[in-house]
Amino acid sequence: MENSTSSKNILRVEGLTKFFGGLGAVQNFDITLNQGDLNGLIGPNGAGKTTVFNLITGIYSLTRGKIEFDGESTAGQEPYEITRKGIARTFQNIRLFSNLSVLDNVRIAYHPHAGYNLTDSVLRTKNFYAKEDELTDQALDFLAIFGLEGIQNETAKNLPYGQQRRVEIARALAANPKLLLLDEPAAGMNPKEIIELMDLIHFIHDRFNLTILLIEHQMRVVMGICRHITVMDFGQVIARGNPKEIQANERVVEAYLGKGAGHAA
Amino acid sequence: MELGFLLGSIVKIAAIIAYFYGVLWVMSLPSRWLKIGGMVVAFGVIQLGLTKFGNFQLLNDFDSGLLFQACAMAMVALGLNLIYGFNGQFSLGQWGFYGIGAYTSADITYRWVNGDARGLIVVGVGTIVGAIILTAIGRLVKKIRGIPVLSAFTLYLIGTLAAGFIAVMVGRLLHPVFQPLLGTNLDPGVLAQGIPMQIMFFLAVIFAGIFAAEVSFLFGLPVLTLGSDYFGIATLGFTIVVNVLMINSDTVLPFPEMKGGRGMVGIPKLTTWFWAFLFLMLVVIVMRNILRSSTGRAIMSVREDETAAKAMGIDIAGSKLMAFVIGSLFAGMGGGIYAHFIGFLSPGSFDFLVSFNPLIIVVFGGLGSMTGTIVSSFGWLFFLEGMLRVLLGQMGTEAPTWRYVLYPITLLLMMLIRPQGLLGAVEWGFLKAKVVSTRPKKIPTPTDSPAVEV
């Protein structure tokens, strides 16, 4: 796994365009992710970042453009089919299954590859017990990795915010993705939690051999962990580069702070 | 007298609820033999109560009637809880599927005891061939991607009609073979009495359930794509359509034996405690096994958050359809139990106003609690039908209608005091989710795991 060519394209997006009525939410957006990338996608509010995520995961249908995941076009596929191919995501506002237990939240991610079917579960066959135990063990392992051991039977909505974020990331990883899309994982976190989160992202990136694309507003996080950053404004890409280049880019500063701000600083 | 009856009724309601708690506890026992033994004992206890010893009978005919009706109601309400409580689809169509199950199974047995095997053959062959054809079409639709829902629906509809045609042909072909074995109503043949008749009843209920499930599949396919409220209205429409078809069953539909609005009489009363208990337990076990599995978690995740479920690789449309079909299967089977207890089916009992009953029971017992649904089904029938009807009946001929004043007040108080329902989402015994404890075992790479403590 680790020896696979590091230049292999995992995601290729070309000319991505989405109109909501007459409003071009995303226009001619391009991005390419190679195996093992940890890249950032930033931009002011309303720039269309989350729309890009929704387009990649198939929640919105494209107006124009091409999305290739792992060398295969995802056009016309249902979101669940795209997810099963290996794209997992988290949400800007945490979307846990709030009335279910933490363990069940993670176990739901195993559903597409649970290894038993409805007949097995109705008749409680040996296969059911074997596979169910196996996936429960795996889910517990995941919770342990994320420092969530001991709270597997808690109802998800009763957890503190930081833990909910971690459950959401654990759930996304349990789906066994190749590409992980994180939508503002640091939103609403305090500085201490943010440092822990950055460690966590580094850790999962290395341990699960993942490709990660990250939307974030906290510049500390983006500049701290991303190797390559794409900046969007009004649905279009306005800059690309490594963190240093982006910080020095005038158009980016302008988009965030307004015209002339770059000179004043 | 009245006070004695009141106390007696309260004791009965408490006893029956305690009884079902006991049954659920027995089913959660660790060993298989203990479970089976416990179930037999649980069955026997009520059976003894129903048996006449000389002049003494603990549970009289009125009580046993309530019991059977409550079993049927519990099956319907459990099905609705699967659809609404666990899957989050607000459905008012449950009563329609209940009616379909009742009429279908009644037609099968009615024809059977009157020397006509076509009811069983047509429905049996139709549902089985239908299931095969629908599965085949389902595979095909999945393979060719991008078929619009309505085109897929048309395909399924054609498949079902083909299955129905095959079934009618087979029925014509096999009918003469069975005829001499069935005899007539007054002189029943070998197959129309004793054990064969009991097997026949079992098949009638199962086929009626499957038939209702297939109808719900066809109906749910286009309708489940609607949002929740619109879906509720569409299912209410379904219940009304089924009711209208019942009223016109002898004119619009080719079933003169159903006698339309006058009501279907002469249905053999085959429901015994054995069948009522067996079918109820079947429903409870199947539903619990589905819910406590990956499929069940997928069903519940759709209720919790559709977008997140999609992003977790869960087929939302498939999940909804599955819950809807299984819920209707239970309703159809409940209808079969009801029809053969009461022996008389009138379209009036499948009116859309009555269709709110299962909904009320499910909300009263707690959305997402199977235990609550069972408890409130029995409590509801014993309270409303048993206690109040008799109690108020002693006060005058008009008085029984007062229960429809007391009953909404009870509901109102309930919703004010405990909006989450009697039991909320709490389960008991067999129905409880297994508590998973952390096993002290290898935790992968503990050394390089980040310091994540909050």
Image (cartoon, coloured by chain):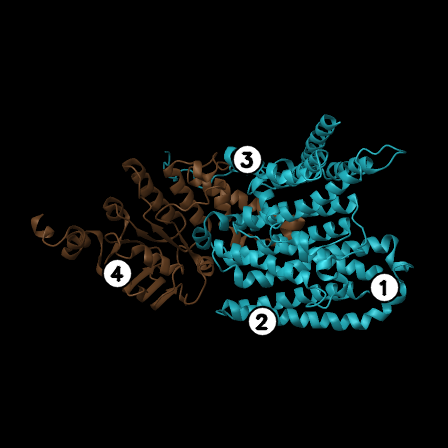
The residue where tag 2 is placed is: B155
Packing grade of label 2 (10 A; few <14, some 14-19, many >=20) is some
- Disc nearer the start of the sequence (1/2): 1
B132 shown above or below A38: below
The answer, for residue A255, to whether it is visible in the render is yes
Left/right placement of residue B141 relative to residue B119 reads left
Task: Give the Cα distance between marks 3 and 1.
Answer: 50 Å
Task: Give the Cα distance between marks 3 and 2.
Answer: 46 Å
**At 51% from the left edge and 67% from the top edge, which residue is drawn?**
B149
Are both tags, 1 and 4, on one chain? no
**Which chain is depicted brown?**
A
* Closer to the eye: label 4 or 2: 2
Residue B115 has which mark? 1
- Disc nearer the start of the sequence (3/2): 2
Tags 4 and 3 in contact by the CB under 8 Å rule? no
Residue A235 has which mark? 4
Q: Quadrant of the N terminus of chain B?
A: top right
Q: Residue furthest left?
A: A264
